């Protein structure tokens, strides 16, 4: 874990260092200044995001569990990303069972877990596609699925996706799925993935429901 972390922090630091070193010589070069203003804040943000995610992963599990409506959570999270999905030519389908049990959940954390899956699905469909979010009641709880028609995940990659800092993306932190996995476990649930490279990926979450 620390090797991955060192690597993730060193890359943006190296970029910042180069720009800062060049600054005295190039201070009156407009092209350089433009690049400076784009790159340095971006790389600083990267380090900042990384630290926030790390703190999140390292935080002791202090969740605030309440009776939580799953359809409300799904509506809220999907509304957050609707514009982004539209802009990316991604068709969103939602299919939620009429009668879903309530969940004993920390709403904020659950939203974060769902968000990570939606963001990944979006990134897996750079030229558009379909994202289907579904929820249905199962024997002791609910099955929630996020199915995309994106690039898919090959078997070797599949082995690593839940590991912190594992990413196949140039600017990925590799912390999204590690965090989602942790949150699902804290809710006594489990998460699974089925994927066909070139065709798409489905993440399935099972969470226990409250018996009424
Ligand atoms: P990041 O998104 O920063 O790369 P994540 O932990 O969110 O980190 O995901 C880890 C890796 O899992 C991604 O780099 C990608 O290779 C793979 N992955 C996750 N979700 C999907 C998806 N929906 N489709 C294809 N690959 C995915
Ligand atoms: Mg991600």
Image (cartoon, grey):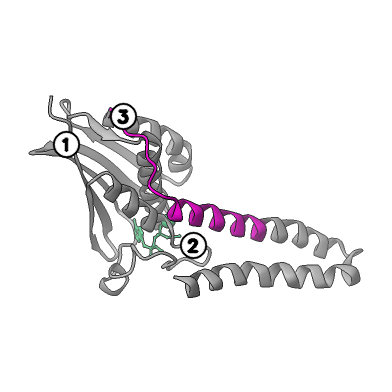
Q: Relative to 53, does residue 172 appear above or below in the rendering?
A: below
Which structural element holds mark 3? strand
Q: Which residue is mark 3?
A: 66
Image coordinates of residue 12 in percent, x first then y, are: 63, 67
Q: Which residue is mark 1?
A: 136
- The part of the chain drawn in magenta is 42-68
Q: Relative to 33, does residue 154 appear above or below in the rendering?
A: below
The structure residue drawn at horizontal position 30% and vertical position 65%, both measured from the top left corner, is 153
Q: Residues under labels 3 and 2: Cα distance?
A: 32 Å
- The residue closer to the viewer here, 160 or 130, is 160
- Of the 4 image quadrants, the one containing the N terminus is bottom left
Res 74 quadrant in image = top left
Which structural element holds mark 1? strand
Asked if ligand 1 lies within 8 A of label 2, the reply is yes
Q: Outermost residue, left direction?
A: 139
The structure residue drawn at horizontal position 86% and vertical position 61%, both measured from the top left corner, is 30
Q: Relative to 139, does residue 156 appear above or below in the rendering?
A: below
Q: Residues under labels 2 and 1: Cα distance?
A: 31 Å
Image coordinates of residue 95 in percent, x first then y, are: 23, 34
- Res. 176 mark: none
202 with respect to 127 (left or right): left
Badge 2: how crowded within 10 Å, few (<14), some, or many (20+)? some
Instruction: Count the marks.
Output: 3
Which numbered disc flags the more N-terminal residue, 3 or 2?
3
Which structural element holds mark 2? loop
- Of the 4 image quadrants, the one containing the C terminus is top left
Asked if ligand 1 lies within 8 A of label 3, the reply is no
- Res. 172 mark: 2
């Amino acid at each position: 874990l620390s090797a991955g972390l060192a690597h993730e922090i060193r890359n943006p630091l190296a970029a910042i260092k180069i720009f800062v070193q060049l600054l005295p010589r190039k201070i009156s070069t407009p092209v350089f200044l433009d690049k400076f203003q784009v790159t340095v804040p971006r790389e600083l943000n990267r380090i900042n995001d990384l630290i926030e995610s790390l703190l999140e992963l390292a935080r002791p599990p202090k969740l605030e569990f309440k009776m939580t409506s799953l359809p409300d959570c799904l509506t809220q999270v999907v509304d957050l990303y609707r514009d982004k999905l539209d802009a990316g030519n991604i068709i969103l389908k939602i299919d939620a069972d009429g009668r879903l049990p309530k969940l004993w959940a920390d709403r904020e954390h659950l939203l974060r877990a769902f968000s990570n899956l939606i963001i990944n699905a979006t990134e897996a469909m750079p030229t558009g596609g379909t994202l289907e979010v579904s929820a249905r009641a199962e024997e002791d709880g609910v099955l929630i699925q996020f199915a995309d028609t994106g690039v898919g995940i090959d078997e070797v990659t599949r082995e690593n996706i839940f590991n912190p800092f594992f990413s196949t993306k140039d600017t990925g932190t590799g912390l999204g799925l590690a965090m989602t996995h942790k949150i699902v476990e804290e809710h006594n649930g489990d998460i699974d993935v089925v994927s066909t490279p070139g065709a798409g990926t489905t993440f399935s979450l099972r969470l226990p429901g409250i018996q009424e």
